[in-house]
Image (cartoon, rainbow, N blue to C red):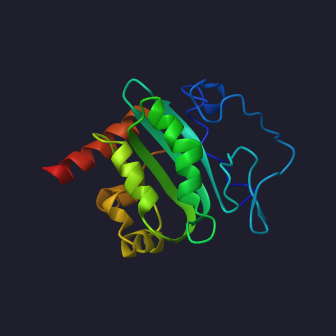
Amino acid sequence: MHEIEPYYKWRDDYVASEDEYSPFYATEYNEFEFDKQVYNYLLHPQWDSFGSNTLYLKVLFADYERGYSIIEFIGEWNDAINNDIMLMKREILELMIDNGINKFVLIGENVLNFHSSDDCYYEEWFQDVEDGWIAGINFREHVIEEFKRNNIDYYINFGGELDDVVWRNLKPIQVFKKVEEQLVKRLN
């Protein structure tokens, strides 16, 4: 896992540690020391911590004018023990929402497992985005099934073409438009 680094080819467009509105503004990274881990697996130092012991993320892009953000995840999403959604909501998402972000693209191809608790924080997040949305792309099938089993798919859009988005060769606006197009189709 230490070789899986957050997607970096959009760094010419956006760097969270250089964005004064970002929860990770002025974060400094040590490229020579592995200071994060999921259980006994070390993680690449570029991943950001928000207080969870098992889930890390990277804000790959934020566009405050259009109101969207693209966030990549790695690890185990564990609401049952660590209450990851509460930590993420309080430490990251609320700050982003306060700065005008109301559309979230969550990239979950490196989320290995999901353990649910209740859906209160998902419901709160969903209500906070009002006219926006939350979409999960490229999550593993068993992770999506666990989200669905706990009715969290009511708040986070999964499935269909969102499960196989080829996003690495696109620019952030293209990823956003591709996801938004799928969500608009669902509403119509």
Residue at image position (27%, 39%) is 131
Q: Is residue 8 left or right of residue 161?
A: right
Q: Quadrant of residue 74?
A: bottom right
For the N terminus, the quadrant is bottom right
Along the line of sight, the residue nearer the viewer: 137 or 91: 91
- Please say if 56 is above or below 12: below
Along the line of sight, the residue nearer the viewer: 168 or 96: 96
Residue 40 seen from this side = yes
x and y, in percent, of residue 112 in the image: 58, 68
Along the line of sight, the residue nearer the viewer: 95 or 5: 95
Outermost residue toward the left in this view: 188
- Please say if 174 is above or below 13: below
x and y, in percent, of residue 8 in the image: 61, 38
Q: Is residue 92 left or right of residue 137?
A: right
x and y, in percent, of residue 44 in the image: 74, 51
- Please say if 25 is above or below 107: above
Residue 138 seen from this side = no
x and y, in percent, of residue 108 in the image: 50, 57
Total marks placed:
0
- Please say if 18 is above or below 168: above
Residue at image position (73%, 55%) is 3
Q: Quadrant of residue 2?
A: bottom right
Residue at image position (71%, 43%) is 46
